[in-house]
Amino acid sequence: MDKQEIKTNEERQSLSFVEQMIEKDLAEGKNNGRIQTRFPPEPNGYLHIGHAKAICMDFGIATKYNGVCNLRFDDTNPSKENNEYVENILNDIHWLGFQWGNVYYASDYFQQLWDFAVWLIEKGLAYVDEQTSEQIAEQKGTPTEAGTNSPYRDRPVEENLALFKKMNTPEAVEGSMVLRAKLDMANPNMHFRDPIMYRIIHTPHHRTGTKWNAYPMYDFAHGQSDYFEGVTHSICTLEFVPHRPLYDRFIDYLQEKDQQHDYRPVQIEFNRLNLTYTIMSKRKLLALVEEKRVNGWDDPRMPTISGMRRRGYSPEGIRNFINSIGYTKFDALNDMALLEAAIREDLNARATRVSAVLNPVKLVITNYPENETEEMVAINNPENEADGTHTTTFSKTLWIERDDFMEDAPKKFFRLTPGKEVRLKNAYIIMCTGCKKNEKGEIEEIYAEYDPESKSGREGASRKVKGTLHWLSTEHCRKAEVRIYDRLFNVENTAVEGQDFHELLNPDSLQVMTECYVEPYAAERKAGEYLQFQRIGYFMADIDSTPEHPIFNKTVGLKDSWAKINK
């Protein structure tokens, strides 16, 4: 085996199993070398981090192999769908860094799907069932026991056609009839036991209005839409594995009817994204929104893409996380800490460093001249010199973090304590000389003296001290609201059967701090600008923030301290 063959094998081993299947199809000349994927969300809620994994797969495959990925809205259930969700899905995909080839809707094919259903009825492959949903469920049997035929299974074709036409009228009663495929009631795959193809819904559709009263089910619309669009690889999550035989059977029938195209889409399944302390059910997320347990779909505690964007996550960090966990054929529960680590690593390279004090106590530099100020130079991002600098104002009276002072400190406390020196970042070395307490014994003011020769950047001012503290001038800062987020749920695995997810909610998932201060430069930052509050963590201005009333959301800490705190 030569070096080139070895390299090829090594590269192949680094590919996901989906990429290996794609490359095999390309090597065999299938579909004339054409690669076409699709991302098919239902517009019945906001996209979440689980959808982001599918987006990265669908769009990433198309990009890597010079194909096209189309966006198709699976809008077959008008009772749950609206244009708000459509617009947010478009926005989220763009924000994640992807661009679709075309935008389609399942509703584009309603007439073609209807005609196909009529063809199946005429072939004796579908029938209208007037049983209740409970009766249909009961006669389907169990995974180990065959089902029984519907009493309507063998009604004449003409009667089925007339009833199917009636289903699409305003007079038809919801739940009174469904159209079912006539397949195999004894098949061990429950999805193959005469699945429902159409049901009656009278809710106006967000695109087609009241034109239709009978709507196709997902299993009937999805594969056919792939076929109509020319999709070569229909990539979805593992829960659709048992649906694949049905997907293929309907494609078989459609090819028999169509007799025009020599291609057929192939369904490939990968593992979905599950995260600790998180739910991925849009139904449950919608319940949280409607019950006002969170502040909307874009609440920064939500696992939605819009919530993560508002919290301050970067699209690059999300994509890096998804690439790191990979794609397999086995479901797993991924640790939220892995996502946060990916975000932390990405933000370290792009966030602007600013000063903020969240739990302030006053520090007076007793030997600093009254009414004098200095502009200290702060580097915006030590990871990127091109990001430049800004200035912060230094004065006699400062805010520092209350936790950065201890009157009776242990030996390894390298912050501020009487008789010890620390450096004020970008400014001077100071020595603590004492403090003032109130009647309750609480620290009201801390006193220190500064060394005028120790200014940062000054020649000869390189004297080393072990501690460095951030600060703000009390007269040159802005009061701010800071929102600190914890896990939305109290348990790692929220998908345990029988649990009421409401009972798993963390009552302390949001802490709002209103007595915080930030430098004016930080107060002027807008939503979408990544910030690091020095020595505290990564933050972003909220969409409701203004220079007069700055509001910041904590994105993630500088280190993963959550697990240690919550042991």
Image: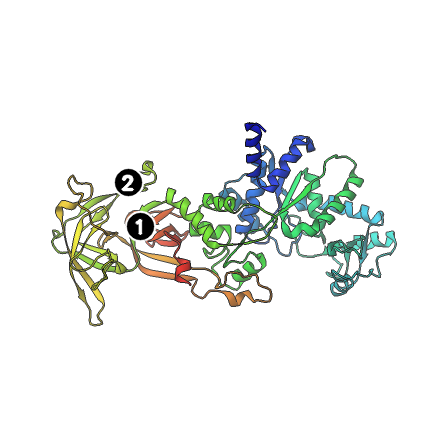
- What is the tally of numbered marks visible in this picture? 2
Viewport quadrant of the C terminus = bottom left
Instruction: Depth check: give the residue in front, 116 or 339.
Output: 339
Mark nearer the viewer, 2 or 1: 1
Upstream in sequence: badge 2 or badge 1: 2
Seen in the image, is 567 located left or right of residue 502? left
- Which mark, by number, is residue 475? none
| 374 vs 416: above or below | above
The residue carrying mark 2 is 389
Question: Could you say whether the residue bearing mark 2 is in a helix, strand or loop?
Answer: strand
| 265 vs 532: above or below | above
Q: Position of residue 564 (x, y in %)?
A: 39, 60
The residue carrying mark 1 is 534
Q: Position of residue 169 (x, y in %)?
A: 75, 55
- CA gap, disc 2 and disc 1: 15 Å
Is residue 188 visible to the viewer in this orientation of the structure? yes
Q: Position of residue 294 (x, y in %)?
A: 48, 61
Seen in the image, is 157 located left or right of residue 439? right
Q: How is the image coloured?
A: rainbow
Viewport quadrant of the N terminus = top right
Q: Residue at x 70, y 45 (%)?
A: 223
Q: Residue at x 68, y 47 (%)?
A: 222
Seen in the image, is 377 located left or right of residue 542? left
**Amino acid type at image mark 1:** Gln
